[in-house]
Amino acid sequence: MEPDFWLQRWQEGRTGFHGAEVMPLLMKHWPLLEVPATGRVFVPLAGKTLDMHWLAGRGHEVLGAELSPLAVDAFFAEAGLTPEVSTAADGVHHRAGRIDLVCGDVFALSASTLGDMAAVYDRAALIALPPAMRRQYVDEVYGRLPRGCRGLLITLEYPQAEMEGPPFSVEEAEVRALFAPAWELELLERRDILDQEPRFRDGGISSLSTAVYRLQRR
């Protein structure tokens, strides 16, 4: 999607994708990754997700990337935090405690910025991108993460013809094709969530599942 699409969504308050609580699937499956407590965690297309607070609360240094200044400002304001702000080549960094939220293009993050990440948590990035951009995203952004980096990836699966994304449906076969051979991939869980998502059901979606994958960079 073009940057203006997401900026307009935040300006208009059309942020139904933002969860009002920490993602239960994150809390359930994160311990399986066995990420060192001091390991840095990358959260792409972070929005103002509370998941960053949860990860920081476990001792991780968190690097989030978000395009919208409104989302960045809201993230800190809603937590009662005043970040230190600095400008770098990859965007405007907002730091408070263990969280560094970069306002800028996720594709602009360099290998030096991402090269020491112990893990990546992707709840909303891959499914936010249309098919033509997903390959570029995995090749360029995930490609800058180091060997041994672990990941938790959460996707959605539904009949794409029944709804125009985002969020998009990303089936398991595509996930495996995108990440092979650089990443080991394991499906941890697939769950039917249609009854929990009235906006999808009311929009005419006939089936909706979420899938959770564990990743590790070879």
Image (cartoon, rainbow, N blue to C red):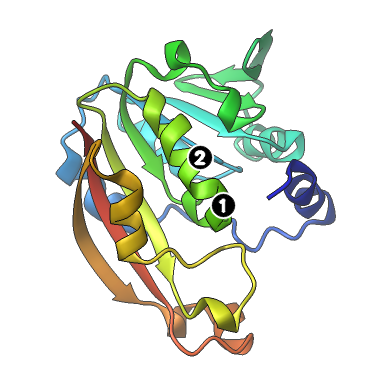
Position above or below: 65 against 180: above
State which quadrant residue 4 falls in.
top right
Image spot of residue 42 (x, y percent): 42, 30
Give the quarter of the image for residue 155: bottom left
Q: Which amino acid does the dot numbered 1 rest on? A: Ala
Q: List the residue tagged with mark 1.
A: 132
Q: Nearer the viewer, residue 58 or 66?
A: 66
Residue 74 makes an appearance in the image: yes
Q: Does residue 157 sit above or below 68 in this rendering?
A: below
Q: Element under label 1?
A: helix
Which residue is painted at 50% across and 37% down in the image? 44
Quadrant location of the C terminus? top left
Q: Which residue is mark 2?
A: 136
| Residue at the (78%, 56%) spot, across then down | 13
Marks 1 & 2, CB-CB < 8 Å contact: yes
Residue 47, placed above or below residue 169: above
| Residue at 65%, 10% in the rendered image | 89
Q: Is residue 59 above or below residue 70?
A: above
| Residue 84 on image: x %, y % | 64, 13
Q: What amino acid is at disc 2?
A: Gln
Residue drawn at the location 69% of the way across and 40% of the way down: 71
Please give left or right for residue 46 compared with residue 13 in the image.
left
